[in-house]
Amino acid sequence: MTHHTKNKGDLGVLKAKLDLFLQGYLVLVPETEHAPFDLVIYKDGKFKTVQVKYRAVNKRGVIEIPFRNSYSTAKGVNTKKVNKALVSIYAVYCPQTDSCYYFNPLEYGESIALRVNASVNHQQKGTHLADDFKKVP
């Protein structure tokens, strides 16, 4: 399988759907690609909207998730901030760890960085360890 951007996104959604199912959620899929979220999950009488992202670990051992979307038009690439109020949960699939990570985007600023590998200077303050984000909040 080639790793075209669309294929990566599709893989992320499939991995998130399986992981959410294994966590006991009923997974619902919107009938449109134009919704501000990719999935809706249901458990214990509560619905949550889920935005899924595919992100690789960078050279520093971090998964970086900015809260913006980019898209191309005839005039070039456009970037738009995500309306975090429309999304209950971000689900991030990482191919290097073959895991999904979950968080409420309203709890973070412009982005979040999840550390997969220990930092060179062993800094822990202000660090978000990816393994702490494997369950839906």
Image: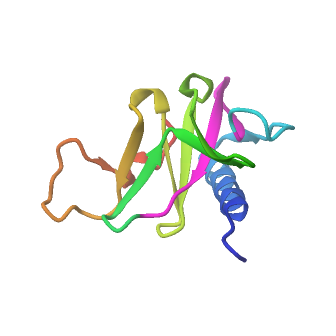
Instruction: State the extent of the magenta-drawn residues as a range.
Output: 38-57
Indicate whether residue 21 is drawn in magenta.
no
Predominant secondary structure, magenta span: strand
**Which residue shows up at 17% across the image and 43% down it?**
125
- Identity of the residue furthest to the right in this view: 31
Give the colour scheme of this rendering. Answer: rainbow
Q: Position of residue 29 (x, y in %)?
A: 79, 41
Residue 6 location, x and y as percent?
Answer: 72, 59
Q: Based on the picture, tell me whether residue 41 belongs to the magenta stretch.
A: yes
Question: Which residue in the rendered view is the most extreme toward the left?
Answer: 121
| Farthest-out residue, front | 75
> Eyeballing the image, is 57 above or below 30?
below
- Report the number of numbered marks: 0
Q: Is residue 137 left or right of residue 108?
A: right
Of 78 and 9, nearer the camera is 78
Res 61 → quadrant: bottom left
Q: As rendered, which of 122 and 24 lies closer to the eye?
A: 122
Q: Residue at x 46, y 50 (%)?
A: 134
In the rendered image, residue 8, in percent from the top left (x then y), is placed at 66, 62
Q: Quadrant of the N terminus?
A: bottom right
Residue in view at x 81 percent, y 37 percent: 30
Q: Give above or below for 65 relative to 60.
A: above
Left or right of residue 15: residue 58: left
Depth check: give the residue in front, 26 or 9.
9
